[in-house]
Image (tube, rainbow, N blue to C red):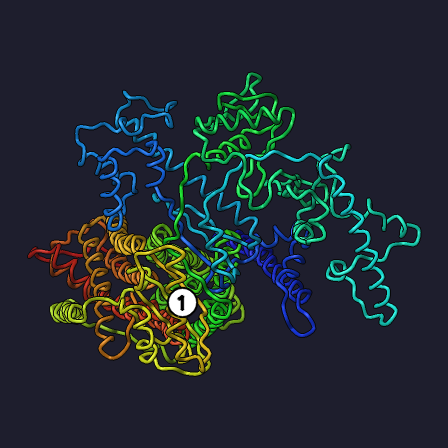
Amino acid sequence: MRYKGAIVWLTGIISALCLFFLSFTWKANAVREDAIAYATSKDGKLDPAKKTRYIDSLWKQPVYLGFTLQDVTTYALHKGLDLEGGFSAVLEVSPVEILRALSGKSNDPNFEKALENASKLQATSTKPFNEIFFEEFAKVAPNQRLATIFANSINRDKLNSGSTDAQVKKVVNSEIDGAVDRVYKIIQARIDKFGVANPNIQRLPGTNRIQVELPGVDNPERARKLLAGAAKLEFVEVAEINEWGQGLNALGEYLAAESKANKATVATATASTDTTKGGLASQLSAPKAAKKDTAKADTTAGAALTKLFLPLDNQGRNWGVMRKDTARVNELFRRPEVKMMFPSNLTFVWYAKGIPSTTGDEIIQLEAIKKTENQPAPLEGDVIVDATNDYDQNQRPEVTMVMNGTGARIWKNLTAASIGKRVAIVLDNYVYSAPVINGEIPNGRSSISGSFTVEEAKDLANVLKAGKLPAPTRIVEDAFIGPSLGQEAINQGYLSMAIGLGLVIIFMIGYYGNPGWMANAALLFNVFFIAGITVQIQAALTLPGIAGIVLTLGMAVDANVLINERIREELHRGVGLLESVKLGYEKALSAILDGNITTILIGVILIIFGSGSVKGFGVTLCIGLVTSVFTSVFVSHVLVDWMVQRKIAAGKEKEVTFETFISKDLFKGMNFDFIGKRKYSYWFSWGLIALGMGVLIAQGGFNLGVDFKGGRSYVVEFAKPVDATDIKEALKDDFEEKGVEVKTFNGPTKMKVTTSYLVEDESAAANQKVRTALEKGLTQFAADKPVILSESKVGATIADDILTQSFVSIAYALIAIFIYILIRFRKWQYSLGSVIALLHDTLVVLGMVGIVRIFGLDLEVDQIFIAAVLTVIGYSINDTVVVFDRIREEIGVNADLSDKELIIKTINTSINHTMSRTVMTATTVFLVVSVLLFFGGDILRGFSFAMFIGVVFGAYSSIFVAAPIVIDLGTGKKKAVAPAANPSK
C-alpha cells in the first residue's frame, strides 16, 4: 500500500488532537460537578447563586493545562438545547419603525399606504421588508420620488431633494442593516452579562432576524424580557470620589467587621471539629486564617476594602473589581445597610469592557452616576440624529455625535453645568464611555476623543446610534426545554447510538468474518473522529445530530461493503490475495467518492437552509461523511493490509476469504432481468405515489408541525397516564375553539399540546394569555399533578418562511445532484434518471405519511422531517451512483447510449453484479434507522419513519427506476456493437 506510513502518522495526529479537545469536555464536566457539590446544602437543595459564584470565581483562572475555565468551557462539547435544556428565540428587528424614523415620522399618505401594503405582503413573502416597501411605494405613487419622504434633517448628510431612488434605497438599506447589527451587539452584550455558558447568537443571513440560544436557562420569561426590551441609552453626570468616598470607607469598616465575625465563626467550628476540607469551595465560604503577625492588619477597614475593591490610580479616584467578584459586589450594594452608606441620589454601574489584569482575570471598573434606579436621565438617546467614527486633527480616532433641536438645548445646559466634570454614556445600565466636558456645547454637535482604538471608536458610535433609530424587536419564534426533557433526549440518543453501533458491528463480522473486524475498527475510529472534530469546530451536538452520527455509522459501512465486495469479486476471479485487496480499494474509490460527495451536498444544503437542531444534523452528517471516507478508504486499508500480511507470513493465506457461511453463496451467479420487468416497477411506483397523494388529499393534507404552520406547543407531564382526548376536550373552551391538538409524547404520562390560539399575536402578553388558558384547562386534572416541561412558539410569518425554505432546499438538492452527476458521468440521461428516481423516493415518503395515518400513526411534518427527506435523497443517490459507476466501468464514459440492446444487457449485468452491495448497504442502514425508529423517541419519530421508508425505496429506485429511465430516455434501435470495456474487468 502506498503512503502507508503517512496514513498511520496522520491517523495518530488526528487521534491525538481529538483526544486533546475531548479532554476539555471532561474537565468542564468535572468543574460543573464540583460547583453543584459546593452549592448543594446538606438537605440536597441546590443554591443557583452559590453555583454561579463558584464558577465566576474560576472563570478567568487557569484550571487545566494553563487554560482558564472560560477557555475550557469554550472548547468543551456544546450540547444543543434539545439535550441541554434552555431557551431559544428568533428576534426580528421591526423595519417599519426604522423607516418611520428615517422619514422623520412622515404623514405622507402614499408612504403610509406603502407601509400598510408591505406589512400585509410580508406574511407570505420571503423578501426583506424594505424591498417589499420599495415595490409597493412605486405602485402606490409611481410618479413620486423616495427623496420626498427620506430627504430630511435626519438624513441631511446623506440625502437631499435631488437624490435618486437608487441613492435613497442604498441609504435606507444601509441604515436598516446597521440597526440590525446594533441590535445584535446590544443583545450580545446583554447575554454576556446574563451569565449563560456557551450562548449562541447569530444573524440569519438575508433577513432582519437574530437567532439566540441560551443553554441551561430555566426562566423563559426573564429571558424573553432580556431579549425583547428596547435599548436604553442615557447621558448622566458622573459622581466623583469626593462625593461618595466616605461611603466607601464605611463599606471598608463594614467588610472588616464582617470578616472578623466570619473568622470567629470559623474558629469556633474548627475547635469543635477538625473535618474542614481545603479547596476553592472552602475558600469561598470562609477566608483562610491569617498568620499571627498579619492578623491585626487584615482586620483593618483598608485591608478589608482592598480585598474586594481595587484602586485603578494612585489617587484612589477610580475603583474596580475583579470580574469573579462582581456578583459579590452586586449582592453587597443590594443590602439596605450598605445602601445607607452612600448618597441616595447615586447609582453604581459597571463599565461594559474590562481591563486585563496580570492574574488572567479582568478588572471591571465601577462608576457612580447621579441618578437613582427608577429616575429618568437628564438626556436620553432618542435625541441622537447621527453618530460616526472619525479622526481628529492629530489623526487619532474620535466619535462625532449630532443631536436634534430638543437634545441640543438640553445638552447645552447639561454641558454648561458640567464643565470639567465627566458625563457617562450608559447603554442598558453599562457605561461605555465617560468623557470630560471641556466646555459648553451649544449646537448639539459633539466630538468625543480619548485613547480609542479604531474598533473602540466604531463600537461607541454604534452605541450612540442605538438611540438614533428605535429598532424595536419582537420574538417571532421561541422555545423553552426543561432540563428533565433534555436529559431524556440524551438518554434516548445515546441508547440509539450504542444499539446501532452494536448491530452494525455484529452484522459486519457475521457477513465478512475477520475482515469485518477491520471494518469495525475503522468504524470506531470514525465515531471517535466525529466526536473530536465536532468539539474542535465548536459545533453543538443536538438530538438530530446524534441521529446523524447513528445514520453515519450505517452509511460509513457502505464504503467498507463496497470495498469488500470488490475484493470478493477479484478473489473469485482467481487473483492473488494482496492484489485483490489492492484492486478492490482502487476500483471502489470512484463510487465511494461520488456517493459521499453527493450526500455532503445535501448536508451543506441542510446547514445553509436549516436552523437549530436541523443545522446540527447537517454539521454532524458532513463531518461523519468526510471522516468515513478517510477511515474506510485509508485506515481500513492499513488494517486489512496488516491482517493479510500476517496471514501470508503465517502461511494461512487461504483463511482470508472476505466471506462467511452466511455470505458465501448469497447472490452468487445472480442473473435477473431487471430491465425487462421495468414496466411493472413503473406501474407499482407511480401507483403507490398516486395512492399516497390521493389519501393525503382526502385527509386534508399533512399534519404540519408548529414550525411550519405557526402556533404554540407545550409538553406536559402527568403523575400517571391520561387520555389525550379528555385533555383536548378540557382545553377547547379555554382556547376559544381556535384549534388544539393533543397527543402522547415519549410515553403515556407525557402529552404534547399544540394550539393556534392567538397565533397572529406574538407579544409577551399573548404568550402569557395562552399559557394561562392552558393552565386553567389543566385544572381539571389537578389530581394528576400536570407540569409543563417545555414550550415553544412560532409566529405565522416565520412559519411561512420556514415552510418555503424547506421546499426550496429540496429543489436545490435535486438541482445540485443533477449538475454533479452530469459533470461526473457526462450524459444528461444519467442526471435526469437520478433526479426522477430521487423525486420518486421523495413522493413515496410523503405519500406513506398519509397511508400510515389510516392505521393510527399520525406523523408531524416539520423541519426535522424535511431533513430526513433530504437525507433520503442523499442516501438514494449514493445507491444510484454505485450502479451508474458499474455501468460506466462496463461501457466506458463516452459510450453511445442509443444502442438499446447493448445498454439493456450492460445495465442488467451491472445491477446483478452490484446487488450484493445494494442489499448489504440497505441492510446496515436499515438496522440503524430501525433503532432510531424504536428507541429515538417521539422527537425523532418523523425523521426515523422517513428514513425507514426512504432506505427501502432508495435501494428499490436505484434498481427499478433510475437505471431503466436511462434506457428509456437515451436509447434507440441501433444494432448491438461490441462493448467498449476492458476484458479484464
Q: Which amino acid does label 1 sit on?
A: Thr
Q: Dot 1: what SS?
A: helix
What residue is shown at x 33% (from left), y 36% (from top)? 100
For this orientation, the residue located farthest to the left is 973
Q: Residues within 10 Å of mark 1 (few under 14, many from 20)?
A: some
Judge from the rendering whether residue 635 lies leftward or rightward of residue 262; answer left or right.
Answer: left
Residue 626 drawn above or below residue 666: above
Q: The C terminus lies in which quarter of the figure?
A: bottom left
Residue 670 visible (yes or no)? yes
Residue in front for this viewpoint, 911 or 61:
61
Quadrant housing residue 784: bottom left
Count the marks: how many? 1
For this orientation, the residue located farthest to the right is 293
What residue is shown at x 33% (from left), y 56% (from top)? 761
Give the x, y percent position of residue 202.
44, 47
- For disc 1, the marked residue is 772
What residue is shown at x 23% (from left), y 35% (from top)? 109
Give the x, y percent position of residue 613.
41, 59
